[in-house]
Amino acid sequence: MKLPIRRAVLRGPLLMLAVVTLIATSACQSSAGAANEGTASILDRVERDKVMKVGIRADHAPHSSVNEKGEWTGFDVDIANAIAKQLGVRLEIVTVTELTRISFTKDGKIDAAITSISKTWDRAREVAFSDTYFWSYQTFLVKKGSGMNTLRDMVGKKIAADRGGNADDNWLAWLKRNGFEGQAEVEQFGDKQAAVAAVRNGTVMGYAMDYEPVMKHVKANPELEALKEPGGFGPKYDGVVVRQNDTKWLNAINFALQEIAESGEYDRIYQKWYGPQADTPLPLQGKITVWPRNG
């Protein structure tokens, strides 16, 4: 015996609810479609236009600076050129600062930032990092004869730090780990030469920054020196910065770094800027991880 088919008829509030649900579902699908239309990888455009726009700092020798001839020079500049070469595109440098390098990446003004930028959890919430391509540590630039020889000598002293950097955060973290929480006075500078001058004239007792630029300033200022305690107060793991949620572009950067490492080009670049004969020698403290190609 066949059972009669019962059809539900929507009336009044039920009909209105169904209509609203249908409209909301269609809107969600439309929004998702629009979002997907804007998710093309940066790699697609870089390969199409044959240009890779990279944000680089002009004030962070030996990583990156502009010489007397107006030419870009430095370790990060050479790394950026090597990546562009691996991708088969032209490098276009866009000047950024510590304060703009992340915002320029997020806003699409640059395709990547190669700016001696240390990996941190806070930064990784805003942008994505490549594999580490440079390893160092942070320490203090101090005046010779100031009595500042160890990190404990710096406890409670007024220090300088770069606005937009993370050396001051690492110094505060070191103080906390070692039982000196709250014993710090930090003045942030937007001008590196002003910070160096503050060390020279005793306005601050030290300038917290990466070891390599510390040594560059020491070379240019015989009355200054690096804090004698080795190892510094914070580790430094640099990565290339790209926008989030673009795995295709991030992979392309990582693969280029691995190709540079395998070919020996990375070692040549590193020795040029940080080898024993360089102005700022720093023994290599890490190695770019090269992934298996198959399987």
Image (cartoon, rainbow, N blue to C red):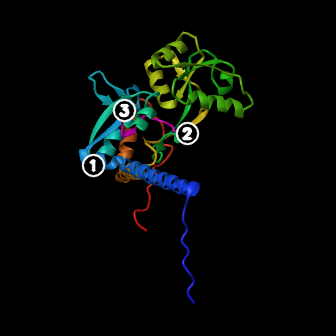
Q: Provide the residue span drawn in magenta.
A: 110-121
Asked if residue 141 lies in the magenta stretch, the reply is no
> Which residue does the numbered mark 1 point to in the structure image?
47
> Which residue does the numbered mark 2 point to in the structure image?
120
- Crowding at mark 2 (Cα within 10 Å: few <14, some 14-19, many 20+): few
> Which residue does the numbered mark 3 point to in the structure image?
74
- Crowding at mark 3 (Cα within 10 Å: few <14, some 14-19, many 20+): some
Q: Secondary structure at mark 3?
A: loop
Where on the picture, by quarter, is residue 57? top left
Mark 2 against mark 3, which lies toward the viewer? 2
Image spot of residue 63 (x, y percent): 41, 32
Image spot of residue 290 (x, y percent): 43, 55
Image spot of residue 97 (x, y percent): 42, 27
Rounded to the nearest angstrom, the CA distance separating label 2 from label 1 is 30 Å
Depth check, front residue: 44 or 177: 44
- Report the side of 223 relative to 253 (left or right): right
Residue occupying the far top of the picture = 201
Q: Which residue does the image show at 52% across and 24% down from the upper left?
A: 162
Q: Which residue does the image show at 40% across and 62% down from the upper left?
A: 293
Depth check, front residue: 128 or 293: 128
Dot 2 or dot 1: first in sequence order is 1
Question: Does residue 189 show up?
Answer: yes
Question: Does residue 275 show up?
Answer: no
Say if mark 2 contacts mark 1, CB within 8 Å. no
